[in-house]
Image: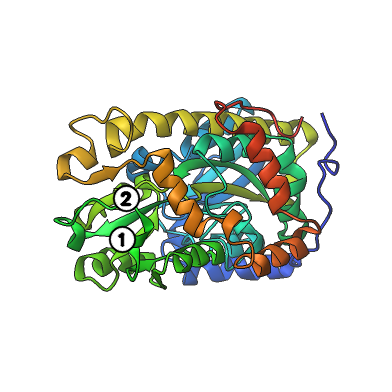
Amino acid sequence: MHDNNNRGISRRQFLSGAAHSAAALGAASMIPGAGSFFIRSAKASKGKYNFRFGASVVSKTNNEHLQTGIYYFVKELEESTDGEIRVQIIDRAQGCAETNCGSRVVNGIYDIGSSSPQNLGSVFPYSIALDWPMLWGSRDEYINFLFSPESNQLYRDVFARRYGVIPLFGSGEMRSIMMGAKYKDADTIRTPDKLRGAKIRITNSEMIAAFASSMKMNPVPLAFTELLEGLRSGVVDATETWPAAATGFGMQNVISQDIAVDFCPGFEMVFISKRAYEKLPARLQEAMLEASYKAMIHGYNGVKKAQNEIVGNGPDPSPSSVYEKVGLRHVTLSQSERDAFADVAGVSNNEDLYASIRSKLKGIAGRDVLDPLREFQASVAGKPLKPQRWWA
């Protein structure tokens, strides 16, 4: 057990109390649904410590696909603390979007937030630190990193020190390349040369942009809310995302091929304001971390089940899964085929291309990021998930 200020993270100045109050009051008029949230919140049963959780676009419906662990986390945290901690979830994009949940947590509008690390890039530039193309061989590898003590100094502590937030847990898959409807009758794509010239919508990650460019694809900035129509109309030929995100947001009818390049992590990350976290006594900080640990295990197992039963990109997809029902081709690559993508676009064969990104992340973290991640990846390559209490 550690005291409140001794978890490997330094203090950071936040907004003044007056600014917090102004931000919270302004939120009711600026954020859709926030006014009714504050009314509901005032009426909700209160614990000794009450947290507002901006869960971005996650909902009970799409969570069946995504398996973020968010709802499990809140239930586990409240029950394990006998209601001493209460969490009000504002989901379904009622309080924040993927691209601004980070800033609303930093500004005190919410205490806890969620987003994909890629979408956090404009708020927290360091959030792309795990995105190195073709570094990770599977989701087990990067989730093992999130469970590991090594993630403290190389990941969690950097967020706390530079942005005043603490990553709690993450759940997801690996990012694929999804081809639009125009490729429905085309040959199955298994090599990077078949993607040359295609317009691909990318998320907010410099490394994903570099990855697409190195394959001679054309990265296109397009809001996620416009992606469905963009794929349908041909404004973009493809997108990169992870399978559950595609089906969870109803894109299966405008996607024809899911090319499982698995080029970098795709997951939803839950994070808490360092200021809010440090208000808790040590025993409740421990409960917060323990609930996060259990939620990450729950999410990992949930994804494995959903891949077969709901999404359809698993090794034994149900006939009722989305991929099977709409005839979406899940293109599983052999190791040699995936290696061909790594040869063309992986970080290890494009050191110069990623040099400026590497330098930028080093400046933020105060140390090189890529080589320690390479060492960790090598230590877990081909190994199953091994959950650890990273803070212990």
Give the residue displayed 17% in from the left and 57% down from the top. 186
Relative placement, left or right, of 295 versus 315 is right
Disc 1 + disc 2, Cβ < 8 Å: yes
Q: How crowded is mark 2: few (under 14 residues within 10 Å), some or many (20 or more)?
A: some
Q: Position of residue 240 (x, y in %)?
A: 39, 58
Relative placement, left or right, of 137 versus 379 is left
Q: In this view, does 287 lie above or below 118?
A: above
Q: Is residue 126 above or below residue 75?
A: below
Disc number at residue 190? 2
Disc number at residue 361? none
Instruction: Determine whether the residue tagged by mark 2 lies in a helix, strand or loop.
Output: loop
The residue indicated by pointer 1 is: 194
The quarter holding residue 302 reads top left
Relative placement, left or right, of 200 versus 48 is left
Check the picture and name the quadrant holding the C terminus. Answer: top right
Q: In this view, does 74 lie above or below 129?
A: above
Q: What amino acid does circle 2 point to?
A: Arg
| Residue 95 visible here | yes
* Closer to the camera in the image, 22 or 137: 137
Give the residue displayed 37% in from the left and 49% down from the top. 245
Give the residue displayed 76% in from the left and 58% down from the top. 365
| Residue 46 visible here | no
Instruction: Determine whether the residue tagged by mark 1 lies in a helix, strand or loop.
Output: helix
Q: What amino acid does circle 1 point to?
A: Lys
Q: Residues within 10 Å of mark 1 (few under 14, many from 20)?
A: few
Relative placement, left or right, of 145 versus 183 is right
Check the picture and name the quadrant holding the N terminus. Answer: top right
Q: Position of residue 75 (x, y in %)?
A: 51, 32
Give the residue displayed 35% in from the left and 38% down from the top. 64
The quarter holding residue 361 reads bottom right
Q: Where is residue 391 in the image (x, y as percent from the top left)?
A: 75, 34
